[in-house]
Structures are given as structure tokens and as C-alpha cells.
């Protein structure tokens, strides 16, 4: 019986690595799994282990992918002349769900933030620069979040596009300042995406 307490403590601590999960939420989740859904807990553990081992990043757009190229980059139904830059895979999913966008993406996996050690190299901007230089992209759609860091990142991306001779556009107003794309309602995001403006 004495061995159960340390393992329970480990479970509670492990659950707290999730965003927004504090001590009480972790306790509620752990107790639910142990009391009512052990099969679900085993399935969660197995799937989580497999995902951590097998899901990496697409070599072209940096989105989550099990293969070298993600499903979107490998598709011949997407328009390679349109490239939308987002901060995270969650932002990509928000754009996909709320708009009729049929182009491709580039996922920064962050935004420029020197204090957090996130510079151009960490955001894969060398890869983006090479992609723009290929000459296939005819419009770079900047869909970074309207935060201070997101705006700084947008300006940096506009400079990269300008050097490559690619027109850059930014999502239109309607997305609230300081907001995060993944939390904005579909209608607002669709309106903002449809009314994007040139950064020049």
C-alpha cells in the first residue's frame, strides 16, 4: 500500500505539465481515471507514448507530422502560390476550420522573442527564406497573432518577403489586439482572413 502514494504523486505531477492544469485539476483527472476509467487511462498512456515517439515536424512547413511531409504539403490539391505563415499548429488548425483557404502553410513554432531565446533561427526563417527564393510563392500571408511579439514577427516576415520580391499581406483588423488565433470565433477569423491587407 505504501508504494501506491509515490506513484499517485508522480501521476499528479505528470498531469500538471499540461497547460491550465493545476493541482486540483490534476487530482480530479487522476481520480477519474483510477476510479472510473482505467481502460481509458491505459489507452491515453499508450497513445501519448506513441505520439511522443512518432510525431515530428514536416520538413517543408514544420507542422506536426508522422511522415517527412505532412498531409497538406504532400497534397496536390493545395495552391503552392499562396503561403500562410502561422505561429503554431493550433493556429493552422484554426485557419483551416474557419476559412476556405486552399494554399500552403509555414509554421513558426513560436514568434520572435529575444528574451525567451526565440530568434530567426529558432523559428526556421532560413527555411522560409529558401522557400520564398524558389519563386513559386506569389503571396505571403502573415497570420501571426496580434500581440507585440506577433507584430514584430510580422514586420520581420514582411522584410523577408520584400527581399524575395514576394507580396506580403497581413490578416485584416477584426482579430482583437492581444488575442490568440486558436481562441477566436470562426466568424471573426473568417472575416479577418478574407479582408487581409498588404503590409507595404
Image (cartoon, helix red, strand yellow):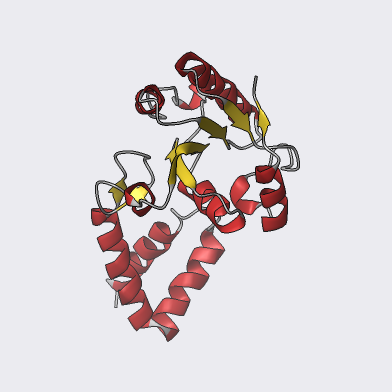
Furthest-bottom residue in view? 36
Give the x, y percent position of residue 41.
36, 75
Give the x, y percent position of residue 73.
36, 46
> Toward the viewer: 16 or 159?
159
Screen quadrant of the C terminus: top right
Screen quadrant of the N terminus: bottom left
Label tally: 0
User: Measured along the vertical axis of the image, is residue 161 above or below residue 147?
Assistant: above
> Toward the viewer: 7 or 119?
119
Left or right of residue 2: residue 105: right
Give the x, y percent position of residue 33.
42, 77
Residue visible at 39% across and 45% down? 63
User: Measured along the vertical axis of the image, is residue 91 above or below residue 115?
Assistant: below
Q: Quadrant of residue 15?
A: bottom left
Give the x, y percent position of residue 98.
61, 56
> Toward the viewer: 154 or 168?
168
User: Measured along the vertical axis of the image, is residue 1 above or below residue 140?
Assistant: below
Q: Quadrant of residue 173?
A: top right
Residue visible at 38% across and 58% down? 14
Residue visible at 56% across and 34% down? 141
Amino acid at each position: 500500500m505504501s508504494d501506491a502514494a509515490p506513484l499517485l504523486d508522480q501521476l499528479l505531477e505528470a498531469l500538471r505539465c499540461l497547460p491550465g492544469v493545476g493541482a486540483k485539476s490534476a487530482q480530479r483527472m487522476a481520480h477519474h481515471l483510477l476510479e472510473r476509467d482505467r481502460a481509458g487511462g491505459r489507452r491515453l498512456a499508450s497513445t501519448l507514448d506513441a505520439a511522443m515517439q512518432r510525431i515530428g515536424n514536416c520538413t517543408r512547413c514544420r507542422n506536426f507530422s508522422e511522415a517527412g511531409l505532412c498531409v497538406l504539403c504532400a497534397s496536390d490539391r493545395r495552391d503552392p502560390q499562396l503561403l500562410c505563415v502561422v505561429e503554431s499548429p493550433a493556429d493552422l488548425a484554426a485557419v483551416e476550420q474557419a476559412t476556405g483557404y486552399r494554399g500552403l502553410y509555414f509554421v513558426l513554432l513560436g514568434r520572435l522573442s529575444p528574451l525567451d531565446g526565440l530568434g530567426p533561427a529558432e523559428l526556421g526563417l532560413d527555411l522560409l527564406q529558401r522557400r520564398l527564393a524558389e519563386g513559386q510563392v506569389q503571396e505571403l500571408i502573415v497570420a501571426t497573432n496580434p500581440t507585440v511579439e506577433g507584430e514584430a514577427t510580422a514586420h520581420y516576415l514582411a522584410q523577408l518577403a520584400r527581399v524575395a520580391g514576394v507580396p506580403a499581406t497581413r490578416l485584416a483588423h477584426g482579430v482583437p489586439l492581444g488575442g490568440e488565433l486558436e481562441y477566436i470565433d470562426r466568424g471573426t477569423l473568417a472575416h479577418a482572413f478574407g479582408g487581409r491587407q498588404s503590409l507595404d
